[in-house]
Amino acid sequence: MLGRDERGLALTSSLALLSTVAVVAAGIAFFATSPKKEPVETARPVVASTPVETPTSTAPEPTVTKEPVKPKPRKPAVERAKVYVEVYNNTNISGLAGRTATRASDAGWQVVGSDNWVGTIPASTVYYPPRLKAAARLLGKDLGVNRLMPAVAPMRLDRLTVILTG
């Protein structure tokens, strides 16, 4: 079906309808995406007022003193001479426990015994009771023993126990 516009051009009704819809959609999109303009403030009348005197204080402002920051309490350093140590040999290397006990004594530890250990230990280990965990870390560093474990029976709970493996 052909129709004519005011200029005399022939348009099909479906083409005219699509053109109208496209123009309307473009107009809606334009207004929907255009930036919003803020309303312009209108000038307000200036009202003259008499100045109000505020009383001034003669007292000096109080000074605020900050409390000094207290350093966090440090864990007490391990006193090697106050920690008992036993050293055991769990290898076929003769004298290993004695030599290691001497190294520990030379480092300042209070070695109270050395002997052979019977049993299976997977790697050289420093065993410790809970209160001596920090001391166990230090003894491990002094002797080059990386494995630390909580003490188990029949180990005594007032000392560190070192068991050396091959």
Image: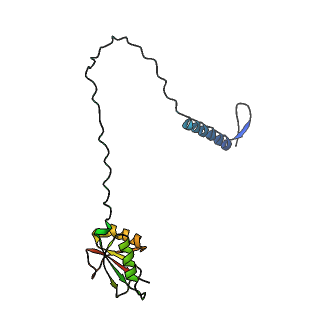
| Colouring style | rainbow
Residue 107 versus residue 5: which sits nearer the camera? 107
Residue 77: x percent and y percent?
Answer: 32, 61
Q: Quadrant of the N terminus?
A: top right
Question: On the image, which quarter does residue 21 sit in?
Answer: top right
Residue 88: x percent and y percent?
Answer: 35, 82
Q: Is 24 located above or below residue 114 in the figure?
A: above
Residue 59 versus residue 30: which sits nearer the camera? 59
Residue 156: x percent and y percent?
Answer: 26, 78
Q: Residue at x 29, y 17 (%)?
A: 54
Q: Quadrant of the C terminus?
A: bottom left
Q: Residue at x 70, y 34 (%)?
A: 5
Q: Is 69 located above or below residue 159 in the figure?
A: above
Q: Residue at x 49, y 29 (%)?
A: 38
Residue 136 versus residue 49: which sits nearer the camera? 136
Q: Is residue 115 left or right of residue 166?
A: left
Question: On the image, which quarter does residue 136 sit in?
Answer: bottom left
Q: Is 6 located above or below residue 128 in the figure?
A: above
Residue 86 versus residue 38: which sits nearer the camera? 86
Residue 145: x percent and y percent?
Answer: 41, 74
* Total numbered circles: 0
Question: On the image, which quarter does residue 85 sit in?
Answer: bottom left
Q: Is 55 located above or below residue 78 in the figure?
A: above
